[in-house]
Amino acid sequence: MIDTPVLERVLAEALRHGGEFAEVFAEDRSTSSAVLDDGRVEELSSGRERGAGIRVVSGDTTGFAHTADLTESGLLRAAEAASAVARSGGGGAGTVAMGPLRTSDTGASGSGDDRPSRVTLASKGDSLDLLRRADEAARAADGAITQVQAGCGGSRRRVLIANSEGLYARDEQARTRFSVSCVASGDTGLQTGFETAARTLGFELFDEVSVEELAQLASARAVSKLSARPAPSGELPVVLAGGSGGILFHEACGHGLEADHIVKDASVYTGMVGQQVASPLVTLVDDGTVGSEWGTFAVDDEGRPAQRNVLIDRGVLTDYLWDYLRARKEGRVSSGNGRRQTYQHLPMVRMTNTFLLPGTEDADEIVAQTPKGVYVAKLGGGQVNTTTGDFVFGTTEAYLIEGGRITEPLRDANLIGNGPEILKRIDAVATDFAMTPGTCGKDGQSVPVGCGQATMRLSGVTIGGTAE
Amino acid sequence: MTAVTGAAVDAGAPGAGPDDLVALAGRVAGWARSGEDLEVYVARGDETDIRAYSGEIESLTSATSAGVGIRVVVDHRLGFAWAGSLERAVLEETLAEARDNAAYATPDEHVRLAEPDGVAAVPVDLWDDALASVPTTDKVALALELEARARNADPRIRQVDHADYGDGSVEVALVSTTGISSSSRKTSGYISVGAIAGDGEASQTGSGFSVGRGFAGLDPDRAVSDAVTRAVRMLGAAKGPSGRSTVVFDRRVASTLLSVVSSALSGEAVAKGRSFFAGRIGEQVGDPGLTLVDDPTDPRAYGAAAYDAEGLACRRNVLVDRGVLRGFLYDTVSGSRAGVSSTGSAVRGGFAGTPGPGCRALTLAAGPEGYDEDGVLAAVGEGLFVQSMTGVHSGVNPVSGDFSVGAEGLMIREGRLAEPVREITVASTLQRILQALVAVGADVEWLPGIAAGQTLAVGDMQVSGT
């Protein structure tokens, strides 16, 4: 994307008027998507965006500028702008000697700029075939299905990161996502069902994923809720199916363990390293290296290799998640969690794939040993206030548990809890581990993440249904 | 707010403002082949974002960006492509890609580009000339002042986790081979602050902001006092009790609630059977006190606009009148599907998005009593006041109408705010909420987003707590 001597000159320009750190993040991203809705292929869309973001750190101030112009003169102008804004922010005038860039790729998947991409993106014709198959499968699954929308999207993102500490890293990330959304109608009105598969892969995703199965799951979810009764209101034990509810950990503690919240004392987990913050059944890991999961990458958006970080070990808080800036302040290294949505954004601390390690119990046994409660087969999204620890997460497929058996379906509802309290109420974890993909939004930036857990039980959570 | 009212101005009128963008979009539209229609949307913008923390500037971003989105219609097939650049080679590549995409779409008689419909645009002035000459040092000073004032406003404030200043300007031009040529430009400015109040072990948060068309008129007093009041009054909050209750939604929360209802009023959702309002035109869908209007020609509205995202004039649309469902919002394609004209309601998320119908400036007609927040609280007497709501994307379904959200706020006792409560949920259905409206405040505030804020009281909601 950009030659090394150019990068060196741009970094030198960025620090010409002072500053301790400068970085160039260049990105070339192509996206394509196809949507089948109402029985028709309605929209094929493609996009291309390339550019670079340059930051200059001077004292406690970060100056940032970005440009879509990747020529040397465009980059030099952006470097000058980043340097100027760092100074107008009142940053000190420290200087730093800059050595040559180490030109070895840090990214395991770094590929040469001029070689053809190693990634196979879905061809338009192939995606359409998948969309039609999903539409047919969803409609064939049940006569109550009145609407189907299927979407197939892929992106390829090449990144290059170079900084004034001599770091030089490249990576190429391909992601593919397929989703099916169904509406079922009946006497009780309309209900919806959704299922998605998403991996850090090209079109090979479909070697592993059956679009018919996704469609049938989405369809069954919508249809079962037509006969659902209102969810209960109040506190009950809740069993989360394997792969249904990793979002629980993402919200209950993941965000609260991001160092940007910690250093501002804006997290309930500040100052709690070494303390028991969860049930001893909880070992929580954030790992950007897992296979082709949705939150996987070779290097993060600051050029740091992805790594496995144990956050909670048998209930004891072991560490937080770090990016370059927050780690530097504490005199340590980044944990590989510096991410950004595009070159137009500053990086910040983000999760990758966050999951609870499996336990030893049998999933069916956990349900059998729950006299009364709620069984959650699928969760939607969630949200947390990291300062208070209060968080919500919503069900999209849930049932009552009565006498140790899964009985009637329930309408969608949010569950609410407080992170540190809920983590202590995990009283059973099974072996049937599974991951689910998601999109995490923070401070206006969205990044792909994975969540995972095996079937587990919370001894009590507040369920926000309408039944009295 | 520094909403500009009054005299018609030429900003936003066709041909004024971003002349070079109109010319550029026109040139690209001129590349159309015979038998194909093209719509070219080009946008260009500048932004400054500043975050202050602990007496220092934590980050300062200054950037310009530009991009294009091209729709091609050939034989009733639509293709779209976008790019984050306006270079000639990129524009050519983007058009080629859009053409290629069109070849794969299913032919659909309703697929077409907008054509001029004779409705004249109401000019709205959304441009503050003065913004461009505000020096960065003044913006930095405002961010630092905001942070310092929040930190010192009350001894119980123990942290200010963000104090942000931001501004931007955007110019847009849209030209099509079907006779559309429109352009618009707008500037915006905001400040936002988040305060953390502490009381022993427990912490509570509150946020405040002020928005406008530029730098002048941003109100740090208002932002700080909102953030601090909201954080401090939550100190000592405990989990609230479960039960049926009348719920009063704070203006900000009510604005979010209206935005959610609006997605069920999209003509596209209705046509595709994804709205609980489908097939109910002319029916009583809400309390007789419910009148809901989308009016982007109101210059006070944050989402005010002269033209929609297909270049048609924005107009006032009555959606619900005294509880009776009167209409939906349409763009060209969804209108054609329903056998009606576009209501000038196309919206799009910048050059990388395609247009679809949506609201820009939704308001409820105020109740006859002319209540402000205190008035609504006094009228309700006993209940729950919600100051913030979480999990809207995970717990509110505009297709089924199921509604369940996390909430924090204060109990209402004897018509006044009483003890704070947190970690509770509030549930009902959107259908029931519209029927169970108890009071609509006259305290309209144009908040950032697509719906006005006004205090709202809804009866018979299920609150889950202890």
Image: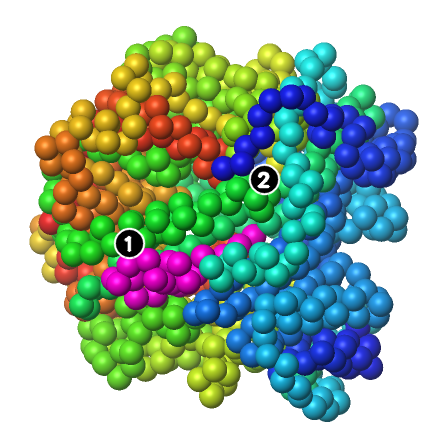
In this rendering, position of residue A200 left or right of residue A223: right
Q: Amino acid at mark 2?
A: Arg
Residue A405 is inside the magenta segment = no
Percent x, y for residue A301? 59, 71
Q: Is residue B151 magenta?
A: yes
Horizontal and vertical percent for residue B132? 69, 48
B84 shown above or below A42? below
| Amino acid of disc 1 | Ala
Q: Which residue is mark 2?
A: B213
Q: Quadrant of residue A432?
A: bottom left
Between discs 1 and 2, the one toward the N terminus: 2
Does B11 sit left or right of B382 as displayed?
right
Q: Position of residue A139 (x, y in %)?
A: 47, 33
Instruction: Identify the secondary structure beneath mark 2.
Output: loop
Which element carries disc 1, helix, strand or loop?
helix
Residue at x 84%, y 67% (from the top left corner): A73
In terms of image quadrants, where is residue A434? bottom left
- Which residue appears at 78% of the width and 51% of the height? B85
- The residue that label 1 is drawn on is B231
Seen in the picture, residue B264 relative to B61 is either above or below; the reply is above
Vertical placement of residue A249 versus B331, above or below: below
- What residue is rendered at 25% in x and 62% in y? B156
Say if B52 sits above or below B423 in the image: below
The span shown in magenta is B146-166
